[in-house]
Amino acid sequence: MDDEDVRRKPKSFKYEVMWERHPELHSFIETNWNGKPKGFSAIEVRDKLKDLSENLYTWDRHTFGNVKKEIKQLAKQLEVLKNVPGRTEPSHLEIKVVDRLVELYHREEILSRQRLRVDWLTYGDNNTKYFQQRASMRRRKNKITALARPDGQLTEDVEQLEGMTNEFYKGL
């Protein structure tokens, strides 16, 4: 999802937040908020919010951990399980690892969307250097400069690229 996609989302589009999916979140917040003295002044409310924020940070680290690190570890474990000699079908452990990886990839996607949303809310429509770099990077990443011909050779010739593209879509 690029920056333009965020702008085009209808107002009713709801961004999923990873924490919202956790069944203990609401009780955790309620316990932490109600466990503190009532906050009537702005300073007391600020202190309660600060404490809640710190507790949520700790809860996040304890509950969700480091998603990228866990994905890397599980991917290595899955490779080992797949390379077991005499393996004929996925083992129970392998299925559990794959299921966990699917959940973690989903979390990683949600986190990515959250970061993008925070950036968008922070920088808005500003024509900042940050957004210019993101657009340039995306343009470079998405540009097709070469394709592999049926004989395996790469071609960068524009006419051949156009012909190969047309043939590909005609074949669909």
Image (cartoon, helix red, strand yellow):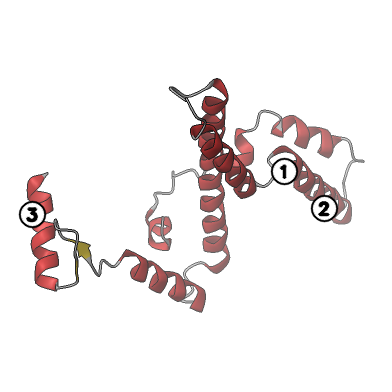
Q: Earlier in the sequence, mark 1 or mark 3?
A: 1
Amino acid type, callout 2 = Lys
Residue 41 is at least partly visible in this image: yes
Under tag 2, what secondary structure? helix
Q: Mark 3 and mark 2 in contact (Cβ < 8 Å)?
A: no
Comparing 132 with 144, the one in front is 144
Residue 17 is at least partly visible in this image: no
Under tag 1, what secondary structure? helix
Residue drawn at 79 percent across, 45 percent down? 58
In the picture of the structure, the residue carrying the numbered disc 2 is 50
Of labels 2 and 1, the one closer to you: 1
What quarter of the picture does the N terminus occupy? bottom left
Under tag 3, what secondary structure? helix
Q: Is residue 90 left or right of residue 44?
A: left
In the picture of the structure, the residue carrying the numbered disc 1 is 60
Q: Is residue 77 left or right of residue 34?
A: left
- Indicate whether 75 appears above or below 154: above
x, y percent for residue 70: 63, 43
Q: Earlier in the sequence, mark 2 or mark 1?
A: 2
Comparing 61 with 90, the one in front is 90
The number of numbered discs placed on residues in the rendered structure image is 3
Which mark, by number, is residue 167? 3
* Mark-to-mark CA distance, 2 and 3: 60 Å
Of labels 1 and 3, the one closer to you: 3
x, y percent for residue 115: 56, 56
